[in-house]
Amino acid sequence: MRLILTSLAAVAVSVSVLFPVCPCPAADVTADAPASTPALEVKVEKDVSYLPEGRKEKGDLYLPKVEDGKKHPGVLIIHGGGWKGGVRNAAREINIGTTLASHGYVCFSIDYLLDDPKSPTMCWPQNLYDCKTAVRWMRANAERLHLDVDHLGVIGGSAGGHLASMVGITGPESGLDPSGPHGELSCRVNCVVDMYGPATFEHRDLSILRATRTEAPELYKQFTVLTHLDPKDPPFLILHGTADTTVDVSQSETLAKALAEQKIEHHLEIIPDAPHTFHLQSKQKDLRPLVLAFFDKHLKPSVSNSER
């Protein structure tokens, strides 16, 4: 397949990233990584345009050190914020992007269309279209990014967890793939990490959908993760804390049960006393080994096979 390379206004910049365990230097950054896995230098490109002209939303790239002839798997990072807030460069997204890139992943953390009560345009399903367009953009720019287009994953927290799940489980058959740009490229991903995202809305009306469940039952069905599950869906890693008062841990338990019923590979990790909105180095548990092992298994098959 011929790769379409789009022009980028972004330039590579060095950043200083602060982790809860230790500060990183202001030059190329290296995550405070598990000792068992060697960490690589990370370069960050900010304010990358990935949507059509006129859209204000941008993305930040987290890139591992370039090695001659080597292609890296990729991970799309989707921020949370109740579908109406949040940004691509919050602490959680920086932590995830730097951690994964330092272990050989090309990461793209994006903004997407948020709900604006003053706008007549509803954010759904454009927010999902934006996330899928980001997957296509990564594939379209694979040569420049040294990206392995056959091994892409997605991770998101809270509302971003919901959107990450939807990226993983919906395709053309769901009517939820955007027509373009890069419409000739696939939106598919190989695996999903859902961090405390909602999976069902049986007893809730959502202002972002501009209608009640009674008024628009089909819209709520379309917006619900459980609607779209089937045995062909990619593997899931689900992370949730027991002290979450925003999205109850039962949401992830319900999702895990539904995945089991469909015989979809999955693992639910419940973190005692963890609240809503933690990243990979929560004070309750260091989740980096678990997340890296999951992505390595599904996005680095040669590494996974050599360890068996």
Image (spheres, grey):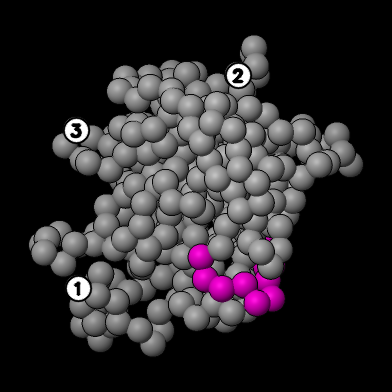
Do residues under tags 3 and 1 come within 8 Å of each other at their CB atoms?
no
Q: CA distance from mark 2 to mark 1?
A: 46 Å
Q: Magenta residues?
A: 263-277
The residue beneath circle 1 is 210
Identify residue type, mark 3. Answer: Glu
Q: Is residue 226 above or below residue 42?
A: below
Residue at position x 36%, y 73% from top?
Answer: 221
Mark 3 or mark 2: name the one nearer the start of the chain: 3
Q: Is residue 152 above or below residue 294?
A: above
Mark 3 or mark 1: name the one nearer the start of the chain: 3
Q: Which mark is residue 20?
A: none
| Residue 65 percent across, percent down from the top left | 61, 22
Mark 2 or mark 1: name the one nearer the start of the chain: 2
Q: Is residue 74 above or below residue 22?
A: above
The residue beneath circle 3 is 53
Residue at position x 43%, y 29% from top?
Answer: 45
Could you say whether the residue bearing mark 3 is in a helix, strand or loop?
loop
**Magenta stretch contains residue 233:** no
Majority secondary structure in the magenta region: loop
Identify residue type, mark 1. Answer: Arg
